[in-house]
Amino acid sequence: MYRSHNCGELRATNINTEVTLAGWVQKSRDKGFIVWVDLRDRYGITQLVFDEERTSKDLIKQAQDLGREFVIQIKGTVIERASKNPNISTGDIEILVSELTILNEAKLPPFTIEDKTDGGEDLRMKYRYLDIRRNPVKESLIFRHKVTQEVRNYLSKEGFIEVETPYLIKSTPEGARDFVVPSRMNEGQFYALPQSPQTFKQLLMVGGMDKYFQIVKCFRDEDLRADRQPEFTQIDCEMAFIEQEDILNAFEGLTRHLLKEVNGVDVEKFPRILYDDAMRLYGNDKPDIRFGMEFGELNAVAQHKDFNVFNAAELVIGIAVPGGNAFTRKEIDKLISWVKRPQVGALGMVYSRCNDDGSFKSSVDKFYNQDDLAKWAEVTGAKAGDLICVLSGDKNKVRTQLSALRMELAERLGLRNPKEFAPLWVMDFPLLEWDEDTERYHAMHHPFTSPKPGQLELLKTNPGDVKANAYDLVLNGNEIGGGSIRIHDKKTQSLMFDYLGFTPEEAEAQFGFLMDAFQYGAPPHGGLAFGLDRLVAILGGQETIRDFIAFPKNNSGRDVMIDAPAPIDEEQLTELSLKLNLKS
């Protein structure tokens, strides 16, 4: 065997034990008469010692020639370490080496394999297999394993059955673009990679598998960002013979279990907020409720005061920044510049200081007196020592802009503690949303989402007012899961396709298999899918997901390590009956 123990295992109780270890050379220190080598594997580091009083000259010479990341095996005796290291688990001992075997030499790595490395992100992604040797990435992957094991154990105990669904499926319009796969055996035809197992899990409910889950890869060809990848992992779940409350209770239970078992945190309350209220109070549908700064709508107290910027606006809206009166003028000017950035898009920002003596000092004192500003404070909930920040403009745009400012201020003020967890259900999303480009309604979630009970008739008169029987689970300002009660009868599903602009022929071509299944006794059903990558990152105290994925893509959707995507040769194109029509 290559090792009797791992490099994080040995303690003072093992002194005088003969051991065999194997791993990578982390670093070495050569004093001429004595050489120390740190040997590393995924379990930890053990110090090796080569001492000329107790070690042959040939063995010392071998040790002196070792380079970083050489793969070696040693045999030796555990001895007490003279200068103990309390920072590592094996810091009380070292190994007096009697035999050294080089299993593989290594080139000098392009960056240091240390917790704090000198390698930039692009370089580390190119050599991801080296980056994984570093503790931050290694521990993130082990953390992900722990979370997925807890998910499987919990759902299995709750009676859920894990079922695999296909990766090669039919392309269907579900929002993002599909990745497509040409079929050699069916000339001119294509599979699609699933954006989610949506229709398959519904078919499993028709098949009687009343509690299903799957930890599954999904694929979406869409623009990327730090918390989005073209291939990602879902904890996909579906239940039959349930109502919305059953699903919320089931997955509150799972979330509560993960927070307790993984983070040691007890969370009892899962508040609920309507989608409309989330947009009104926070400007987005995934609000971070670890801190306040709820929006105050100021139209009634800020308009018709000869300040045309506000008078011309559809919405005047503000937030109270706790302790913000301590900001210097220079700091406030930087905030104004921040909201004017193209990524935010505001034209400017009005502010009002709430002084300790109860008076106010505003950037628009020319138009508003102390009584006016006191009303601003009342609407926003501002107190003495706070700062009121006000934006105005188109309703939807200004809410998005103020939401971005709220999150930026919370970051600057240290209000987003990654060790504090605040879950929240957002309920009753719109069923449909209007698309200006196509000039028709699209499903906000997907075409299989059921409208709220009693609202089906509204589709005929006010389709934009219909609420979906849908819900998102938000944690610390991130959507970690979303789902809905599904349509389970052919008549309602046909009606939904009709309002989404599908002709009967298009609906049959795309979803005929599902409609057929509904005719054979489909039970009431619904579900929820967690984004595993994002969930793991948040539980791990991060908001970006790359370090929790073994081999992630970059912002261009490329794997720079294996250089993919890549061209295929002409012979393969011919075999697949494909011809490229590249834009110059």
Image (cartoon, rainbow, N blue to C red):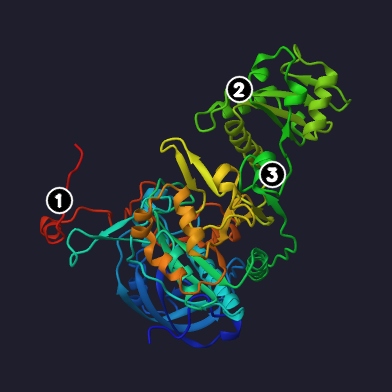
Question: Which quadrant: the N terminus?
Answer: bottom left
Image point 33% across, 62% down: which residue? 170
Label 1 residue SS: loop
Label 2 residue SS: loop
Q: Which residue is mark 1?
A: 579
Q: For residue 348, which numbered disc appears in the image? A: 2
Relative horizontal placement of residue 245, taking residue 126 as reference (left or right): right
Which circle, 2 or 3, is nearer the viewer? 3
Earlier sequence position, callout 2 versus callout 1: 2
Residue 424 visible somewhere in the drawing: yes
Badge 3, how many Cα within 10 Å: few under 14, some, many 20+?
some
Marks 3 and 1 sit apart, C-alpha to C-alpha, by 51 Å
Q: How many marks?
A: 3
Residue 551 position in % (x across, y down): 39, 60
Image point 75% across, 24% down: which residue? 352
Location of residue 489 with respect to 503 vertically, above or below: below
Amino acid type at circle 1 is: Lys
Image point 72% across, 20% down: which residue? 303
Q: Which residue is mark 3?
A: 277
Residue closest to the eye, 535 or 456: 456
